[in-house]
Every structure is written in structure tokens, then in C-alpha cells.
């Protein structure tokens, strides 16, 4: 397989930490991470995030548990949708503590979260957290700037639109000299052109990488190319180097059965009818191993450096075993894992 990405491909595992509300034991998630690490083919493990609209095991707490059960896997969020709702000083201390406990293995992927206009569940969450939905993007930008300052060597004095600090030092400091901060964003194809460019430029200007999902391979390639071009404009071509994709996977020799289980799992996870048919087409990799290999390969060819796979089945360990033995060997020539 020929990959157009300039970096070796690193595979991530996304754990369904919301599924504990639907009968999947929390211990199973931890065991799945342990098995993924033991396989030697996964580089990272990721968990999702929301407070109220889509409740689940809280992301940072879950990653702390995973830090204690693994030794090599990097630990990330996919993505921290509550980021604009979190107080930056508290988050800086919490995340730095996680980085220390894990030996410097964290990746922080953030986003602006779903807006109140998407439905009453989201509107109630923003109201409950005391944050106006319309402030999501500027709060994310200010929050990223503050995290970088709090994780730096000097006390922070800062006056912004939302936060004010005077001579505050956040301790402990992270183990990593620079924690990777990734921005997750996936504008719909019908979004205003100026708004889409603003979102892509935000990644290029502030982040170390881009995260997305439910994006067709051609659109993935086009957007990632633009992000890299914008990064070069800002003199950040060497900093913006990672493109991660969240992909829903169900491996089954019977493709119809695989799709049925996958869609049923997602309907429980996100709510019936929450995911459009168009997004499903790009978000799903299902059926025999060859079909899953082909779907993943399309995104690697489009420039994806970190495919993050979520198994959409109660049988997390069985899916993991088939993936390790029947899917990921197809990518051995382009894949790399952490040492």
C-alpha cells in the first residue's frame, strides 16, 4: 500500500466510554486497552467527552484509569467537547497531572462542542454549565492560549475576553515539553465558505494537528491540504503535522449483519436518527476484513496519519482480536508504534 502521508501511520483505539450507560462494563474498556497495548500494533487510546447532553464516564478520570492500566499507549480525547465549558486554570492542572501520572503520554484534542441550535439536549447543557453557546469558538481559542501559558515556565498574568489571572503559577507542570493540542472540527459540506475557511485556519494557527470524522476521503484530502497550506502561511508547517480520523468499525464476514449491529450500536450511543445517512457512509468501516482494510486505506491515501478505530459492538475484545489479526497487518508497511 502506498500512503501519501509524510509521516508513518499510527493506529489509535477509541473506547466507547458512553456505552457503560447501556450495559458495557467499565472494566471491559480497561481490558480492551490492555489487550490493544499488548498487541503491539496500536499507538494510542482515546475516549469521548460530554457533560450532560451525551453523558458518559468523564474523560479525564477515564484516561487516568487507563494511565494506570497501560505503559506505552498515548492517551487522548476524541474530542474534549466540554473544553469551552471548563475553567482553563483547573483544566491546566488536571491535564498536567494526567501527563505526570502517565509519564508524558497525553494528547489533548479539543473542539467547540455541539451548539444549542442542534437541539434541546445541547441547549440545556450550555445553560446548565452557564456558558452561552455562541461563545464556544472564542472560548476555545482563549482556553488554548491559556493552557500554553500555564504549562510554561513563568507565572501567568492575563486579561482576556473571558478570563483574568494575575501572577498565577499552575503546578504541576506536564512531563512533555509541549503537550500536543489538536483541534477537532468537521464543518458540513454546505457550510458558508468563509466559516469553513475560518475553522480550517484556526487549526493551522493554534493546533498541532487536525481531528475529524464522517468526512469523505476526497474532502479529507482537500481539507488537510488546505490546513497544511495555511500552516505554512503562519510559519507553522513543522508544527501542524498530524491528521486523525475517528472511524466506526464492525468486522463480520456477513456485511449485512455487521452494518445492522453497527447502526444499532450507534443508535443506542448517540440516539435514534441522530446520525445522517450521508455521514454514516463516510463514518463506517464494516463487513469482512478486506472491506475494512479498503475503507481505512482510502483515508491513509488521503493523508490520514492517525486512524482511530472504534468497535461498534458489545464484543469489544472479539472485534479487537479480529482487527489485530485480520485488518491491521495489511498496513504493516506504513504503520509505526511508539517504542
Image (cartoon, rainbow, N blue to C red):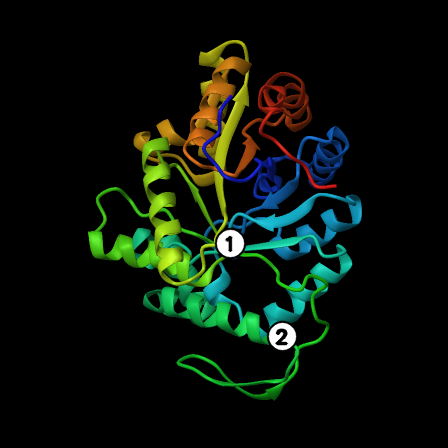
Determine whether 147 is above or below 99 in the image. below
Task: Tell me which residue sits at (28%, 44%) in the image.
Answer: 188
229 horizontally vs 24: left or right: left
Q: CA distance from mark 1 to mark 2?
A: 28 Å
Q: Quadrant of residue 321?
A: top right
- Reading the image, the residue beneath label 2 is 152
Q: Quadrant of the C terminus?
A: top right
286 horizontally vs 220: left or right: right
Work out whether residue 227 can be spotted: yes
Q: Quadrant of residue 199?
A: bottom left
Q: List the single residue furthest toward the bottom.
A: 166
Question: Tag 2 or tag 1, which sits nearer the N-term?
Answer: 1
Task: Tell me which residue sits at (71%, 37%) in the image.
Answer: 33
Q: Position of residue 1 (x, y in %)?
A: 51, 21
Determine whether 40 is above or below 164 in the image. above
Disc 1 to disc 2: CB gap under 8 Å: no
209 horizontally vs 119: left or right: right
Tally of numbered tags: 2
Badge 1: residue crowd in 10 Å (few <14, some 14–19, many ≥20): many
Q: Position of residue 98 (x, y in %)?
A: 70, 60
Q: Position of residue 64 (x, y in %)?
A: 72, 54
- Reading the image, the residue beneath label 1 is 50
Residue 244, disc: none
Determine whether 117 is above or below 167 in the image. above
Badge 2: residue crowd in 10 Å (few <14, some 14–19, many ≥20): some
Q: Secondary structure at mark 1?
A: loop
Task: Tell me which residue sits at (65%, 49%) in the image.
Answer: 75
Q: Quadrant of residue 126?
A: bottom left
**313 or 299: nearer the viewer:** 299
Amino acid at each position: 500500500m502506498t500512503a501519501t502521508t509524510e509521516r508513518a501511520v499510527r493506529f489509535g483505539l477509541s473506547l466507547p466510554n458512553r456505552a457503560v450507560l447501556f450495559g458495557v462494563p467499565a472494566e471491559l474498556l480497561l481490558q480492551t486497552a490492555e489487550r490493544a497495548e499488548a498487541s503491539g500494533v496500536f499507538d494510542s487510546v482515546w475516549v469521548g467527552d460530554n457533560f450532560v447532553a451525551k453523558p458518559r464516564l468523564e474523560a479525564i478520570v477515564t484516561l487516568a484509569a487507563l494511565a494506570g492500566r497501560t505503559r506505552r499507549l498515548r492517551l487522548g480525547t476524541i474530542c474534549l467537547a466540554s473544553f469551552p465549558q471548563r475553567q482553563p486554570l483547573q483544566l491546566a492542572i488536571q491535564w498536567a497531572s494526567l501527563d505526570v501520572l502517565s509519564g508524558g503520554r497525553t494528547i489533548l484534542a479539543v473542539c467547540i462542542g455541539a451548539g444549542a441550535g442542534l437541539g434541546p439536549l445541547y441547549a440545556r447543557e450550555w445553560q446548565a454549565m452557564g456558558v452561552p453557546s455562541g461563545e464556544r469558538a472564542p472560548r476555545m481559542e482563549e482556553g488554548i492560549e491559556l493552557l500554553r501559558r500555564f504549562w510554561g515556565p513563568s507565572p501567568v498574568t492575563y486579561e482576556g475576553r473571558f478570563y483574568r489571572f494575575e501572577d498565577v503559577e499552575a503546578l504541576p507542570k506536564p512531563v512533555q515539553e509541549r503537550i500536543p493540542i489538536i483541534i477537532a472540527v468537521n464543518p458540513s459540506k454546505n457550510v458558508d465558505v468563509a466559516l469553513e475557511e475560518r475553522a480550517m485556519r484556526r487549526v493551522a494557527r493554534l493546533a498541532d494537528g487536525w481531528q475529524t470524522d464522517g468526512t469523505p476521503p476526497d474532502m479529507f484530502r482537500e481539507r488537510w491540504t488546505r490546513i497544511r497550506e495555511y500552516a505554512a502561511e503562519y510559519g507553522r508547517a513543522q508544527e501542524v503535522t498530524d491528521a486523525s480520523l475517528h472511524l466506526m468499525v464492525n468486522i463480520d464476514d456477513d456485511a449485512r449483519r455487521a452494518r445492522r449491529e453497527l447502526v444499532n450500536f450507534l443508535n443506542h450511543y448517540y440516539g435514534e436518527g441522530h446520525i445522517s445517512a450521508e455521514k454514516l457512509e463516510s463514518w463506517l468501516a464494516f463487513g469482512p476484513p478486506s472491506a475494512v482494510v479498503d475503507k481505512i486505506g482510502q483515508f491513509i491515501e488521503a493523508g490520514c496519519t492517525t486512524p482511530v478505530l472504534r468497535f461498534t459492538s458489545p464484543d469489544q475484545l472479539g472485534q479487537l482480536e479480529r482487527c489485530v489479526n485480520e485488518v491491521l497487518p495489511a498496513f504493516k508497511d506504513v504503520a509505526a508504534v511508539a517504542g
